[in-house]
Amino acid sequence: MLLHIAGSSNPLGVNSSQDKISFYPYFFLKDAVGLALALIFYVILIHFYPNLLGHSDNYIQANPLVTPTHIVPE
């Protein structure tokens, strides 16, 4: 918030408020909409498709007496 009050796109340090865009209605709403869309996507992914990013090998029951085939001695 302090960055936008001072003017982040003001490299010359000119103290005019004519060429600045206010932070509150524009950037705040844009960031709020982006955050809401990301949260909606996250909630849908977690609640409706929890196994979408998983791997099918996670459902194979482990046998503690057998070493997996991909583990070999050097």
Image (tube, grey):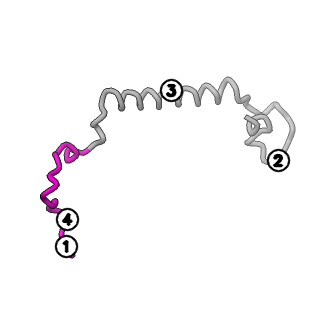
Q: Residues within 10 Å of mark 1 (few under 14, many from 20)?
A: few
Q: Which mark identifies residue 36? A: 3
Does 57 sit left or right of 26 as displayed? Answer: left
Q: Is residue 71 magenta?
A: yes
Q: Is the magenta stretch mostly helix, strand or loop?
A: loop
Q: Give the range drawn in magenta.
A: 55-74
Q: Which amino acid does label 2 sit on?
A: Leu
- Indicate left or right for 1 with 17 as reference: left
* Residue in view at x 67 percent, y 23 percent: 25
Q: Which amino acid does label 1 sit on?
A: Pro
At x 52% / y 30%, what residue is drawn?
34
Q: Image quadrant of residue 66? A: bottom left
Q: In this view, does 31 lie to the left or right of 12?
A: left
Residue type beneath disc 3: Ala
Q: Name the residue under label 2.
A: 12
Disc 1 versus disc 4: distance between alpha carbons? Answer: 7 Å
4, 52: nearer the viewer: 52
User: Of the residues under marks 1 and 3, which one precedes in the sequence?
Assistant: 3
Amino acid on which the number 4 mark rests in the picture: Ile
Q: Are marks 1 and 3 in contact (CB under 8 Å)?
A: no
Residue 71: give its label.
4
Residue with the most extreme right position? 15
In three-dimensional space, the C-alpha distance between marks 2 and 1, rounded to whole angstroms, equals: 65 Å
